[in-house]
Image: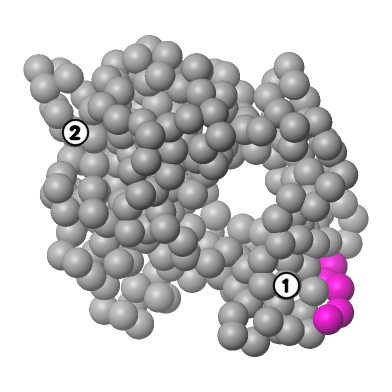
Amino acid sequence: MSREHCATLYDLPSLYDAVVKPGPCESFYRKLACSTGGPILELACGTGRLTIPLALEGHEVVGLDASYPMLSAARAKAEAKRAKVEFVLGDMRRFDLGRYFALVIVSCNSLAHVTANEDIVECLSRIARHLVPGGMLAFDVVNPSMRDLAQCGHTAERSETDPDRSYVSGSKELVAYDPVQQVQVLRWRFEVLGRKMPPVAPMRLRAYFPQEMPLRLALAGLELAARYGDFDGRLFTGSSPNQIYVARTARNAS
């Protein structure tokens, strides 16, 4: 298969679920959902690892994703667990659902897939237009490390299945970084039972720096309510692994 026609990780939901495991972000967003109520919209919902638990906890939930294979896997999971979720195929830069939500979630660094300035402006503006007055947006992005970004070619992360750690393993490598566009190019490599799998397409992710996101939220008409450095709610610092944002619309917004 040529590089131009390589599958992406999001074309392979079983592989995605094998190497990208639930983490502390899910409990953070579930607690937030309990305080805001619904309806809830999750953008880039993937295979439903957050959307489905939210529905099982009694929330009205819509999950939107641009990958048909990921949504198909999410629908199958929801049906198996008898979770009532509306899944929508769509682009978080251009969606228009014709309804409003008390909470919009973009979890697990998914906003980093929006790499162009005009697209992040459009994405945040569309989120704001889908929120009720006083509604909340919650999302997390990685806190970039300049040292890591300068060291292209090193393995940044390794993930293995559990408990059978010999079944599927994956390593994520930073192969390029454009400091002007703030875009990283990441390459995943996978092994099954110790044998290398065909390559998946490189992944392009935006690096969002701490000073830019509050400004972007303000330009979209959203007020920053909180920023944390991890999913336990610790204060954000330069060494924090994540930037976790909670923003709201003005209560008198139309």
Q: Looking at the image, can residue 249 be seen?
A: yes
Percent position of residue 159, x then y: 67, 66
Give the left or right position of residue 236, taking residue 4 as reference: left
Residue at position x 46%, y 61% in the image: 23
Q: Closest to the observer: 162 or 39?
A: 162
Quarter of the rendering occupied by the N terminus = bottom right
Mark earlier in primary sequence (1, 2): 2
Where disc 1 sits, the SS reads strand
Q: Which residue matches tag 2? A: 135
Q: Closest to the observer: 143 or 234?
A: 234
Q: Is residue 210 above or below residue 8?
A: above
Which label number is shown at residue 207? none
Disc 1: CA contacts within 10 A as few (<14), some (14-19) or many (>=20): many
Percent position of residue 6, x then y: 80, 57
Q: Which residue matches tag 1? A: 169
Disc 2: CA contacts within 10 A as few (<14), some (14-19) or many (>=20): many
The amino acid on which the numbered mark 2 sits, given as a three-letter code, is Gly
Q: Closest to the observer: 20 or 198?
A: 20
Residue extent of the magenta highlight = 194-198
